[in-house]
Amino acid sequence: MLTDTVVARTNFRFRARLTCGQTIWWRPGFERNASVLETAEVSLTARFDALLARFIEMGHDLGMAAELETGSMPSHSEGWPLSPGYDGETLLAWACAQPTSPSERRRQLLQLIWNRLSADTSLDHTDLRRALAAMGSVPRERFVPIEFAPLAYLPMAGDIGHGQSISNPIVVAAMTAAAGITAGSSVLDVGTGSGYQAAVLAELASSVVSIEVISELADSARTRLSDLGYDRVRVETGDGSLGSPCMAPFDAIVVAAGAAAAPPPLVAQLKIGGRLVMPIGSVGAEELIVTTRSAGDVTMESLGPVQFVPMRGSFGRP
């Protein structure tokens, strides 16, 4: 099925022209055997697996099982990871099955996410529909490196540099829905990354403060969000585990990095009834936890296993 594939090297980037007509660009550093890749024809399946093995080594989640052609997904039991990894051949098949139009790719992905999360999680369906509507308004291809743009609407995370990644869209949808954001909400986004989650939140909330510890990522996200018209988002550079006391309290806080426990400053910056959504647990055993603050108490609910980059800062991982 995957034959007659031509791989060419251009400006130190590689592109694989697939038999289905798609083009995938790969960043320098993913290619271990350049002499092999520069041959006129290669076995794309084997080469794709090798590239994805490198991607896994870099610590990035590779996506959620799905049938992209139909938008359907099998139901799984409680405890099934929100974003398990899959091999290169499976992801390549999904890439080839994509429609040509980015808007149709986006629609197909959103249907896939609805099928997954509405069946297998306790998320409120109204909140989930609102989250998906918000994601439908955000061009995810603008928040990934250009070489990954053809993969922007696959159910997979992606490398954005500096050891960070853009989250799997299934997880973005789950976190957004779990936050319970309304039109008047004030939201804190910890771990800006490329700015995608902040953009999705801004489609729902009245204001978003987004904090990124890596200054280069904060600067690029600030520019990107401004260029796309997301004036409701204020991007700050700093220790996200400390929150933003000057802008608190918040109706919701969404954290895209894992820690052993919820940082006390973040819980303290929630309004009564506010929700903190973040991955919590030991490394390799994190769960997406929704912490809701009430008068004098908090409640916690798990949405299932996840895998995130570690939180940095005063209340992050050592």
Image (spheres, rainbow, N blue to C red):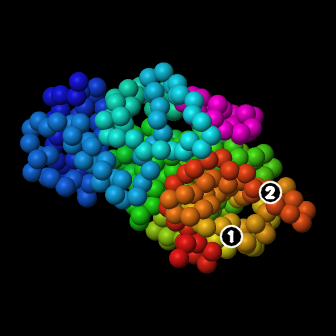
- In the rendered structure, the answer to whether residue 230 lies left or right of residue 308 reads right
Other-residue count near label 1 (Cα within 10 Å), few / some / many at <14 / 14–19 / ≥20: some
Q: Which residue is mark 1?
A: 263
| Residue type of the residue flagged with mark 1 | Pro
Magenta-colored stretch includes residue 228: no
First to last magenta residue range = 110-129
Taking the view exactly as shown, the residue that stands out farthest to the right is 295
Residue at screen point 52% across, 28% down: 73
Tell me, yes or no, if residue 254 can be seen here. yes
Task: Tell me the mark number nearer the camera, choosing from 2 and 1.
Answer: 2
Q: Which residue is mark 2?
A: 299
Magenta-colored stretch includes residue 112: yes
Across and down, in percent, residue 316 comes to 58, 72
- In the rendered structure, the answer to whether residue 130 lies left or right of residue 140 reads right
Give the main secondary structure, helix, strand or loop, of the magenta stretch. helix
Look at the numbered disc 1 and give the secondary structure of its residue.
loop
Other-residue count near label 2 (Cα within 10 Å), few / some / many at <14 / 14–19 / ≥20: few
